[in-house]
């Protein structure tokens, strides 16, 4: 065989190995795009059905609570039955949720669609994320953690932008966006059904459905150290996702309707770019950097409210995205650094449980406060909560770093080269 033929064969082989990774990444992106697509549509729903701010947060939280239920019950299922069956089933459920959105005629229908979507996303998130970890190659160790961090932000940005453009230019945007996503999910389900399995199924599937949160022992300390920053940044994201359009309308009542959706797009895009830009930083450094950016974003958003300045609000959204991206990728790399294969999906599920609880519960609280008082008061109280959480997280991380640097203390696990287990049960550094 000639050298040219050998090179072509190697190139085709490498492409075949990359395709499953690209497919699983696209599933995470599409799922999060679908989850954020309703954000710019909330003002449309509010005007059409006279929904209150509390109603919007209830619809938003129906998704996150259903997602949490799915994570708690199906988080480990793909370890037992394989990634492929879980993903195909979840994508089929996502198709049903898109159909429910397209046919929605009131708040009850929206809640039903959001519940279906939350169940589908929760079941698929840990399975697709674990599949990405399964597909890590010796020369690209750590790319799964990077992808698990960047895909949600990129997906949310894509979903908000698509929905915003359809509101502006397409007829029937509350139908068109969901039908478009439905076609994407159908194609992905077919592709997954035809792709190879990456896990080694084993018994215990029914027992794994018992609601529980399980974190691999190797990841517990990292999750405790980074958890405060994760909670703060996801709580901030929850405010922008559920009440961001209403906040923009409060600051600038005469601004175009698209501005409400674009503020969350700005946050999501900034987050995705930050994940990529900070990928070379040590995980704990990225987490510290992002956590420190949270109070600045909060103060600037409140300044935009008092000054009635839309540029200040969008600048705050950029900083909030920087915080979200840096904390998400830094903390996830810390958590996944040394998790063995059997604990990957459950550890990812636990991470997402923490994230979505932090995203949903404060958002509902903000909706209640908005109903009792008004959005400006709710925004101030929400900002105070997020600032307090971020300050606590900073103190925790800095204290841990100081203890780690002391001569008598072992180095912080996330600051040294993490350890990865190979198929032969040998131990080697994991280059992330």
Image: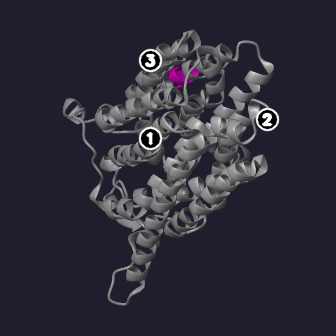
- Mark 2 is surrounded, within 10 Å at the Cα level, by few (under 14), some (14 to 19) or many (20 or more) other residues, namely few
Q: Is residue 417 above or below residue 137?
A: below
Which of the two discs, 2 and 3, labels the residue nearer the N terminus?
Answer: 3
Q: CA distance from mark 1 to mark 2?
A: 26 Å
Q: Mark 1 Cα within 10 Å, few/some/many (few <14, many 20+)?
A: some
Q: Secondary structure at mark 2?
A: loop
Is 291 on the left-hand or right-hand side of 174? left
Question: Which residue occupies the foreground of this view, 40 or 56?
Answer: 56
Mark identifier at residue 255: 2
Residue 244 left/right relative to 205:
right
Residue that sits furthest to the front in the current view: 373
| Label 3 sits on residue | 112
Q: Residue at x 49, y 48 (%)?
A: 235
Q: Is residue 188 magenta?
A: yes
Foreground pick, 86 / 8: 86
Query: What's the magenta region?
Result: 187-191
Name which quarter of the figure residue 202 lies in: top left
Measured Cα–Cα span from mark 2 to mark 3? 31 Å
To which residue does mark 1 refer? 365
């Amino acid at each position: 065989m000639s050298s040219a033929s050998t090179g072509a064969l190697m190139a085709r082989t490498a492409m075949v190995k990359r395709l499953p990774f690209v497919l699983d990444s696209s599933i995470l992106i599409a799922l999060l795009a679908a989850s954020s697509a309703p954000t710019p549509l909330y003002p449309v729903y509010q005007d059409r059905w006279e929904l209150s701010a509390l109603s919007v947060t209830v619809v938003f939280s129906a998704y996150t609570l259903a997602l949490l239920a799915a994570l708690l019950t199906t988080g480990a299922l793909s370890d037992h039955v394989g990634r492929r069956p879980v993903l195909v089933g979840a994508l089929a459920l996502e198709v049903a949720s898109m159909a429910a959105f397209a046919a929605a005629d009131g708040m009850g229908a929206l809640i039903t669609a959001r519940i279906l979507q939350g169940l589908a996303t929760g079941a698929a998130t840990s399975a697709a994320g674990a599949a990405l970890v399964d597909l890590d190659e010796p020369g690209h160790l750590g790319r799964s953690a990077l992808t698990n961090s960047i895909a949600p932000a990129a997906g949310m940005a894509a979903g908000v932008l698509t929905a915003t453009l359809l509101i502006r230019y397409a007829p029937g945007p509350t139908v068109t966006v969901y039908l478009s996503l439905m076609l994407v999910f159908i194609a992905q389900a077919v592709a997954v059904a035809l792709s190879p399995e990456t896990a080694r199924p084993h018994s215990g599937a029914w027992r794994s459905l018992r609601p529980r949160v399980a974190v691999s022992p190797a990841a517990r300390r990292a999750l405790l150290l980074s958890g405060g920053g994760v909670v703060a940044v996801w709580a901030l994201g929850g405010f922008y996702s559920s009440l961001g359009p209403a906040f923009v309308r409060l600051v600038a009542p005469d601004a175009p309707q698209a501005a409400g959706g674009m503020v969350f797009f700005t946050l999501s895009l900034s987050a995705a770019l930050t994940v990529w830009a900070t990928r070379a930083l040590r995980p704990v450094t990225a987490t510290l950097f992002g956590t420190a950016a949270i109070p600045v974003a909060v103060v600037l958003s409140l300044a935009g409210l008092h000054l009635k300045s839309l540029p200040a609000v969008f600048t705050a959204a950029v900083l909030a995205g920087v915080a979200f991206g840096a904390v998400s990728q830094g903390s996830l790399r810390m958590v996944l650094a040394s998790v063995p294969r059997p604990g990957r999906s459950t550890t990812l599920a636990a991470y997402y449980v923490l994230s979505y609880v932090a995203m949903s519960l404060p958002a509902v609280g903000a909706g209640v406060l908005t109903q009792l008082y008004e959005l400006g008061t709710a925004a101030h109280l929400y900002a105070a909560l997020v600032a307090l959480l971020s300050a606590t997280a900073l103190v925790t991380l800095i204290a841990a770093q100081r203890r780690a640097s002391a001569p008598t203390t072992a180095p912080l696990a996330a600051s040294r080269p993490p350890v990865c287990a190979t198929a032969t049960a040998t131990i080697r550094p994991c280059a992330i």
